[in-house]
Amino acid sequence: MYNLDEIGKRAVEAKYALQTFTSVKKNEALKAVAKAFLAREQEMLEANRKDLEIGKKNGIPEGLLDRLELNYERIAAMAEGLEQVAELTDPLGEVLESFSRPNGLQITKLRVPFGVVGIIYESRPNVTADAFGLCFKTGNAVILKGGKDAINSNIAITNIIRDALAKEGIAEDAIQLITDTDRSVTNEFMKMNKYVDVLIPRGGAGLIRTVVENSTIPVIETGTGNCHIYIDEDADIMKVVPIVMNAKTQRIGVCNACESLVVHEKIINLVLPAIGKALAEKNVEIRGDESVKNILSDCVEATEEDYGMEYLDYIISIKTVASIDEAIEHINRYTTRHSDAIITENDEHARMFLDKIDSACVYVNASTRFTDGFEFGFGAEIGISTQKLHARGPMGLKELTTYKYNIVGNGQIRP
Amino acid sequence: MYNLDEIGKRAVEAKYALQTFTSVKKNEALKAVAKAFLAREQEMLEANRKDLEIGKKNGIPEGLLDRLELNYERIAAMAEGLEQVAELTDPLGEVLESFSRPNGLQITKLRVPFGVVGIIYESRPNVTADAFGLCFKTGNAVILKGGKDAINSNIAITNIIRDALAKEGIAEDAIQLITDTDRSVTNEFMKMNKYVDVLIPRGGAGLIRTVVENSTIPVIETGTGNCHIYIDEDADIMKVVPIVMNAKTQRIGVCNACESLVVHEKIINLVLPAIGKALAEKNVEIRGDESVKNILSDCVEATEEDYGMEYLDYIISIKTVASIDEAIEHINRYTTRHSDAIITENDEHARMFLDKIDSACVYVNASTRFTDGFEFGFGAEIGISTQKLHARGPMGLKELTTYKYNIVGNGQIRP
């Protein structure tokens, strides 16, 4: 049997060991790992070649093979990523609040690491380096469980990181990889509450659902985005096509891409022909209601299911509404609470939309594609939270920390 | 079949309706509910009498019957509790951060309600009023699932609250009670991610474990406290007995009570006789290791299991250590990460303890009994979180909220 318990214990030991290092020391280690990536890239590429060969033999789809592939450029990007994380401000030790009570107790609320973070992801080997960098910077030991298809690449990357840490005199168990990719091991991992403080799934909707349904460890749900753009009756029509096209087609397979348009019936004749033409040029299939079909002859009838879909593809749904209230109601029903936008020049409508849409990021006159840790200026991103517990929207370094209370007295007892 | 789906939908409607009320209006409603409690106390007492009769017939233990019982005093306390919550500052709408990006996007991070909070609790009917007050104040609709033994009391309390809300012109579905206490209904409730944003279990370790293991909704784990006091070699012996006795015996059945002492071997002869005598006077059973048994003849041999126990009873475990490092290691192994304390006059030891103990509240020279929302000055408490996600330690009003990002642009698209 695979010894997950041993992995858990080691991670806990590493979490305590990590407390003893200064920011400077941790940043040096991150840079040393980046150097090691470049120095040992052949090893990584060789391991990756094995994964690619097996993948091809098993007939995994082209897109997946692309995500799985490492090359000089991608390895350089991984190294560069760690260098950048090293440059960011260390969020640890920040005093969030400090106050004294009438009885003289001095209470300090301060930012500390979670401790042990678990990450379950699919077959992008760069996530291995990326997740390590963010967790390490924030003082967390990390246990990684990557996709089966990337196992050789992940082992190579993890070994390089562990060797570099050891050379720097840092507990190499700051990163551990679960190398048994059997589903039963993953299931057991998701119940390691004794050792793991937080579990973060990174990947598609299926992976996230599995983790949410099976984990007993607190989970941060990330990533599913059925993002809407509502074109209000008072929209500036010059803004409509650029925002819609950017949000829908700039990158198709990402969670902050737009999947659904909601259009006010008063403006539909004005804006839809131009939107339809621009979408057609990019070969985006349109699924809409009767009013949309009347204007765009190629439009397919949208089903109830369409409005709830995160296509991640060249497809978009369009819904006509008679009022902003109807738009808000529709969006709140179908959104995955990731990012939704309104295009309007009407301040009151903008205010209503901002107040009433129950999503992590609500936009006025901008593309939903900005929901991103880097675009928000966080300098890093571990994912986009679509739940309300702990963190919402883009998660940077701070979101990988928690807090504790230190209370200093001189003999106080409770009356 | 019990229609949980309908309850979920109504809660979501109520959550949007609650957004439309000002703080003043919500506070008036809280006061109106408090008045209604006093005006309709006979109705509550009658319902409670039914619960008590059934409870006695079913032979539920004395302690549980006590917790189940309502009387004039307890109803007055429930009303008073709501009045107090009405007086607290409304945490909603607080701007947590506001910044603009180089591209001109204006990003505002602001405090908002969770939306729909689920609370699963045992047989203390006052939790019904209490949980409603805190959730309502923070703009959350609440779905309650109380213990079977208190069902008649809970129905009465909920009806009184709903009537008072309706009279105030506020969506009465701001509070809903699940009246089918069948386990299968509870199980279904714990999987209502579609409607419920956060689930908070309030009760004993068994209830909390059940919720953590079965819920797919994000859970805030509360309450289990295996709290330690470490008596350092440099402790001021005048502080030892008062702190230990306060933490262990001031209230036995609470999560912030001390369950285990850790004593440095150099000071054990000095402090243990006095501790033993004081504990014996309160009939506290001592379970300790060899060194403890050598000093206290009544001491029972402590097992491995003892060190991990939350007794909630007149029992305490005592462990001898040879160093502060050993003390920290022992506590970090057995603590439930609720509250742990050191008694010492040595600043370096105090610092080490504060830094290294991985618990929500870490004390120097004070009783663990202070881990409490009121003692921290929060003015309210929904529970003590022992997990690291979202909130740690005492949870007040702020901890019943989340945040969202509002982003205002003028046509920005992502390059």
Image (spheres, coloured by chain):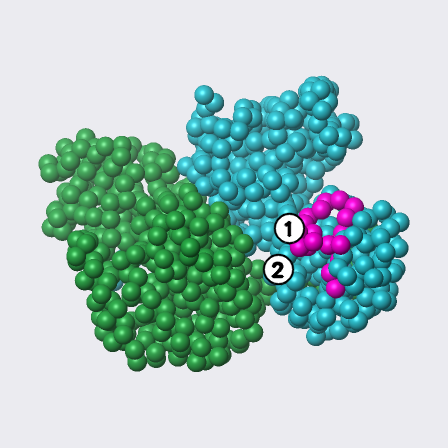
Chain colours: A green, B cyan
Q: Is residue B243 above or below residue A208?
A: below
Left or right side of B207 for B306: right
Say which quarter of the image contains residue B350: bottom right
Q: Is residue B33 above or below residue B140?
A: above
Magenta stretch in the rendered image: B301-320
Secondary structure of residue under mark 1:
strand
Q: Is residue B316 magenta?
A: yes
Q: Amino acid at mark 1?
A: Pro
Which percent across, then down, holds residue A375? 35, 62
Name the residue: 86% across, 67% down: B270
Residue B103: mark in rendering: none
**Which of pointers 2 and 1 indicates the residue nearer the eye?**
2
Say which quarter of the image contains residue B146: top right
Q: Which residue is mark 1?
A: B394
Which percent across, then down, holds residue B300? 78, 52
Name the residue: 77% across, 61% down: B290
Q: Earlier in the sequence, mark 2 or mark 1?
A: 2
Q: Let me know if residue A300 appears in the view.
A: yes
Name the residue: 73% across, 73% down: B347
The quarter of the rendered structure image containing the N terminus of chain B is: top left
Q: Which residue is mark 2?
A: B333
The quarter of the rendered structure image containing the C terminus of chain B is: bottom left
